């Protein structure tokens, strides 16, 4: 009979056969602690009373798994000991281009510095064990690398170069600070300067850098679309569909079955519409609103992806692996195959589609009085575009030519509801900072012709408020019924960042009032006070930097930025896996699905958060490449801009209208010695008092563009009228 002792339960990551009473990881660690010193496997087996043969072989596999995960160490004598008893700390390597690195401990705490001679044995992202060797004058730990327990880089994408008989690949990822040597005969047909993928066959050690073999040639350095090919491989984005997934996608029906339609609530006559960007291809949400005697009824219909993607299927496994769709400027890597994302799951107009619907009754105070979830069949009555809807609202009736009266009444009600929800949002103190995104326009050769900033209009905000209302309703429904699911959480800022923000605002004459417990209203009050100030952008930037990142979690802890006690993601299951998980949890409540495994949620939350960060970083990298490519032929040109950031080594400047950012190095600033004020985010000249701060208008000349480094260097242009440096008083003799 299987033991009920939790210490003997199988660990989820141990691929072991069924062995009765096999000690668990906790029991092994306890036994080693009792022995008091590193010991052999035979001694450990005797201590745990594990019999010879299959049981002892299974124990050995488990011990090796613990070594792999950094819990145990096997020394040079082959003896096993507890890593914590050996004062070894597991963590991930954060490499720097100058050769040194830091190790971020998995258990939290200060990063541990590795000198170049220690760091050369690793690459960025490797999982290692380190021992703290001491502390510097500022009490920061530095250490020695004991062992690399997991390699993070099996392949590298970069430019191939030759030097005599050897080749080498310079990684495109700036965190990978070692070139990969390519021995003679291992370069294939790669030519000097081409972008290639190299498989690492020998990882770096004390005596040599990594050695690899070219496995794929992506093409010439400046070929159109190269930035996306590089980002896909640099960040290991899954982009090829496995055969089993393609086969499963082909079997998905092109239309809902009559039996499924008959089972659901029929909303085909309800004038639901989708409102998206002009270049959107997958439509996963449709909305409708009407006035009532007590307020509004808001209907949010979301594509029922869970009906077609079953847990454990090939489609589901691939969706988990991808975690999210990745949106590059001219290409999308979808989470689901196009047969679903642009086909049966997309709420295209005049087509019957299955949906999971959230219907809300909202009072005149903006509060949701009642929310219901149900499965339905819908038919989108129109595919609308944000800017067209906004022009219609502003009086250009022809911008929505062909829209019927029912849709027009719903749009009017949606705008009225948006005004109400905006007041409620402001009253509860939710933070509201409009972001500006770049939009690239290409010529017939695939090169960038222009870059412009896209700004949100009220039509964007209208849909955002509708989605937030549905997400909140879903979160509260799941909590009320104690359903296992994923939540979108945003924690309270750290105390030290709040203190820095308070000092910074004090220097600007703004009071940052907050009690013992922080409230989003404290931050919202600062943003409101800054709206009419010339330094508004500076204040918004510093406030944003004081906040934490939102992540996914199995436990609801609220959303600080939105000032909500409960929040989840429900409205985009075509492109985000957490939304699909929430749909399954809701459908389980509707008796049409199985309840989710609560034990799997923490790991799934961490994975989905990682996939989101990976997608964001890959997209930022591709956008940075495109901006540099656009500026290559503009060296020497002068542009007006605005200071977007300040550091001790220089000033970051964002150019007006074209949304491109570069840096003026401190050595290029007007003759003076400059001191960086970290609290005030200011570079200030010691002799003449000239200042550079976020939000300041400035004119710059393009000095250099480095595509490989994703860097644009500026120098100051001739000072504009009235831009004379401030001079201090002349001291009397």
Image (spheres, rainbow, N blue to C red):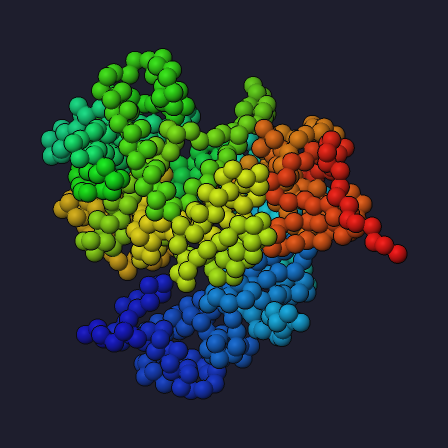
| Depth order, front residue of 134/249 | 134
| Depth order, front residue of 157/686 | 686
- Seen in the picture, residue 111 relative to 341 is either above or below; the reply is below
Residue 418 percent location from the top left of the image = 32, 33
Q: Residue furthest front?
A: 732
Q: Residue at x 33, y 49 (%)?
A: 564
- Seen in the picture, residue 62 relative to 218 is either above or below; the reply is below
Residue 518 percent location from the top left of the image = 41, 57
- Seen in the picture, residue 522 relative to 304 is either above or below; the reply is below
Q: Residue at x 58, y 49 (%)?
A: 508
In the shown orientation, is residue 724 left or right of residue 558? Answer: right
| Depth order, front residue of 413/701 | 413
Q: Quadrant of the N terminus?
A: bottom left
Q: Residue at x 43, y 47 (%)?
A: 524
Asked whether residue 677 is in view, the answer is yes
Q: Residue furthest right?
A: 733
- How many labels sit on residues? 0
In the shown orientation, is residue 282 left or right of residue 626? Answer: left
Q: Quadrant of the C terminus?
A: bottom right
Residue 583 percent location from the top left of the image = 25, 44
Quarter of image, res 299: top left
- Seen in the picture, residue 444 relative to 731 is either above or below; the reply is above
| Depth order, front residue of 131/616 | 616
Residue 483 percent location from the top left of the image = 22, 54
Asked whether residue 149 is in view, the answer is no
Q: Residue at x 24, y 50 (%)?
A: 476
């Amino acid at each position: 009979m299987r033991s009920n002792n939790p210490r003997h339960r199988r660990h989820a990551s141990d691929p072991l056969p069924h062995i009765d009473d096999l000690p668990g990881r906790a029991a092994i660690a306890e036994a080693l602690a009792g022995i008091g010193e590193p010991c052999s496997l035979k001694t450990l087996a005797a201590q745990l009373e594990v019999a010879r043969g299959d049981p002892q072989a299974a124990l050995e596999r488990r011990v090796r798994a613990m070594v792999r995960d950094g819990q145990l160490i096997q020394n040079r004598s082959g003896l096993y000991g507890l890593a914590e008893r050996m004062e070894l700390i597991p963590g991930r390597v954060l490499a720097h281009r100058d050769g040194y690195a830091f190790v971020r401990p998995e258990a939290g705490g200060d990063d541990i510095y590795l000198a170049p001679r220690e760091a050369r044995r690793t690459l960025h992202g490797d999982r290692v064990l380190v021992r703290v060797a001491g502390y510097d004058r500022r009490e920061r730990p530095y250490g020695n690398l004991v062992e690399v327990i997991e390699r993070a880089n099996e392949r590298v994408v970069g430019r191939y170069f030759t030097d005599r008989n050897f080749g080498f690949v310079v990684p495109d990822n700036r965190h990978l600070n070692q070139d990969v040597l390519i021995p003679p005969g291992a370069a294939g047909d790669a030519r000097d300067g081409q972008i290639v993928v190299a498989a690492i066959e020998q990882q770096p050690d004390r005596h040599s850098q990594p050695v690899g073999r070219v496995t794929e040639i992506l093409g010439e350095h400046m070929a159109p679309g190269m930035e996306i090919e590089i980002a896909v491989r640099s960040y290991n984005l899954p982009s090829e569909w496995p055969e089993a997934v393609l086969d499963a996608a082909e079997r998905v029906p092109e239309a809902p079955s009559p039996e499924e339609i008959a089972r659901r609530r029929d909303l085909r006559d309800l004038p639901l519409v989708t409102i998206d960007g002009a270049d959107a291809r997958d439509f996963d949400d449709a909305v409708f609103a009407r006035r009532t005697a007590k307020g509004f009824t808001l209907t949010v219909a979301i594509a029922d992806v869970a009906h077609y993607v079953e847990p454990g299927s090939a489609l589901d496994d691939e969706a988990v692996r991808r975690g999210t769709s990745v949106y590059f400027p001219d290409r999308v890597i979808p989470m689901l195959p196009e047969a679903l994302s642009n086909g049966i799951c997309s709420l295209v107009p005049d087509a019957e589609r299955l949906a999971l619907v959230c219907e809300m009754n909202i009072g005149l105070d903006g509060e949701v009085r009642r929310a219901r979830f149900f499965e339905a069949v819908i038919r989108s009555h129109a595919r609308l575009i944000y800017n067209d809807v906004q022009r219609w609202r502003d009086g250009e009736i022809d911008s929505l030519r062909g829209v019927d009266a029912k849709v027009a009444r719903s749009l009017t009600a949606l705008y009225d509801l948006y005004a109400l929800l905006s007041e409620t949002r402001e009253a509860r103190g939710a933070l509201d900072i409009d972001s500006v995104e770049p939009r690239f326009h290409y010529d017939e050769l695939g090169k960038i012709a222009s870059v412009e900033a896209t700004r949100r209009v009220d039509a964007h905000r209208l849909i955002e408020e509708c989605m937030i209302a549905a997400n909140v309703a879903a979160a509260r429904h799941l909590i009320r019924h104690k359903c296992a699911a994923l939540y979108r959480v945003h924690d309270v800022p750290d105390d030290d960042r709040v203190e820095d923000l308070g000092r910074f605002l004090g220097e600007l004459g703004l009071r940052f009032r907050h009690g013992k417990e922080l409230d989003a209203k404290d931050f919202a009050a600062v943003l409101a006070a800054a709206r009419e100030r010339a330094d508004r952008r500076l204040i918004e930037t510093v406030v944003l930097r004081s906040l934490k990142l939102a992540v996914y979690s199995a436990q609801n802890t609220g959303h600080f930025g939105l000032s909500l006690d409960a929040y989840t993601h429900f409205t985009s299951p075509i492109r985000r896996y957490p939304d699909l998980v929430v749909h399954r949890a809701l459908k389980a409540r509707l008796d049409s699905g199985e309840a989710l495994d609560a034990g799997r949620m923490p790991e799934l939350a961490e994975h989905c958060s990682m996939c989101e960060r990976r997608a964001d970083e890959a997209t930022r990298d591709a956008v940075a490449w495109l901006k540099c490519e656009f500026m290559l032929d503009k060296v020497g040109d002068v542009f007006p801009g605005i200071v977007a950031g300040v550091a001790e080594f220089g000033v970051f400047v964002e150019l007006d209208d074209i949304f491109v950012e570069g840096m003026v190095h401190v050595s290029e600033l007007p003759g003076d010695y400059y001191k960086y004020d970290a609290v005030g985010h200011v570079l200030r000249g010691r002799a003449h008092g000239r200042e550079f701060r976020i939000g300041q208008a400035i004119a710059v000349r393009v000095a250099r563009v480095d595509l490989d480094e994703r860097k644009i260097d500026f120098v100051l242009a001739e000072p504009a009228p009235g831009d004379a440096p401030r001079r201090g008083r002349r001291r009397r003799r």
